[in-house]
Amino acid sequence: MNALLIEDEKLVALELTASIAEVDPTIKIVGTVGSVKTALRWFAENAEPDVIFADIQLSDGISFTIFDKFKITCPIIFTTAYNEYAIQAFKVNGIDYLLKPVDWDELRQAIAKARSLTKNQNKTAIDVQKLLNALSIPTISKPTYKEHFLGNARNSWVPVRVTDIACILRDELNFMITNAGERYILDYATLDEIESLLNPAQFYRASRHCLVNINAVQSVKGLANLKLLLVLKSPNHQVAIDISRDKAPSFKKWLEQ
């Protein structure tokens, strides 16, 4: 099965290529393109592959532009760092939506879906436009995000605006640190639950134990092994957060949005 990669981060493209080889060595990567422009040229000069692995946000636009120009009939597996609420739209159409860093088990399942489509239905045409319309957030059902949290301090509840939160940490309990340096316990069982209530454009899951507000970032320093060290603005400048090598590319893209 031939596959095309649409990914603008070279390191991520290399890691995805290696992951695909580990999960299914029979897949042949016939091309890797990193922008809308180069992808359009590739489709104009090459036959359609059996499956496409496509990031959504590229260096010169979004990958949906490519599918507007060319009628793609092969399965498309979207890979992205952004957890949008419309991802379930892909499930009913036989396409998967993988969040970076890509999990091998999820990758294996996605490839199995694509292979089943190409084998049993002889490249059954997929309604790409329907997928794109499903991804577009309807005006009547835009996702709503949390605006305030109640923090627990000395048996008292303190309302805190989300915009005033510098970061949210997990250390046995979940607690938030405000831009003013105040700390409050949050009455939520998991950090995953809290993350689902926050705007992903404003808060980034820096690690299993930390969510950080983009407006609270003071600086980012490169470390050994391609890791990053994130430092928050004063008075929280002593709070240092490690960004793993795997998360570094998506974190950089998040900062540049």
Image (cartoon, rainbow, N blue to C red):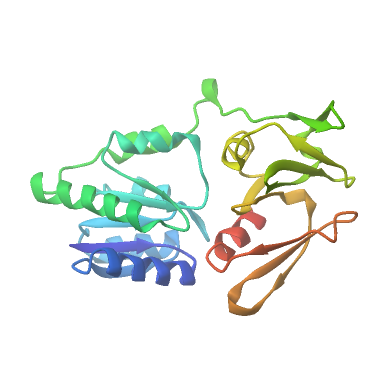
Within the image, what quadrant is residue 192 found in? top right
Location of residue 18 with respect to 138 vertically, above or below: below
Where, quadrant-wise, is the N terminus in this rendering?
Answer: bottom left
Q: Where residue 129 sits: x, y (%)?
A: 33, 37
| Residue beneath the point at 60% across and 39% down | 190
Looking at the image, the residue that sits furthest to the top is 140
Q: Where residue 223 sits: x, y (%)?
A: 67, 76
| Residue beneath the point at 33% across and 34% down | 130
Looking at the image, the residue that sits furthest to the bottom is 224
Q: Where residue 28 sits: x, y (%)?
A: 22, 69
| Residue beneath the point at 40% across and 56% down | 103
| Residue beneath the point at 20% across and 57% down | 50
Location of residue 200 with respect to 66 vertically, above or below: above
Location of residue 86 with respect to 113 vertically, above or below: above
Q: Nearer the viewer, residue 52 or 214?
A: 214
Q: Where residue 193 sits: x, y (%)?
A: 58, 36
Callout count: 0
Within the image, what quadrant is residue 16 found in? bottom left
Q: Is residue 5 left or right of residue 239?
A: left
Q: Is residue 137 left or right of residue 151?
A: left
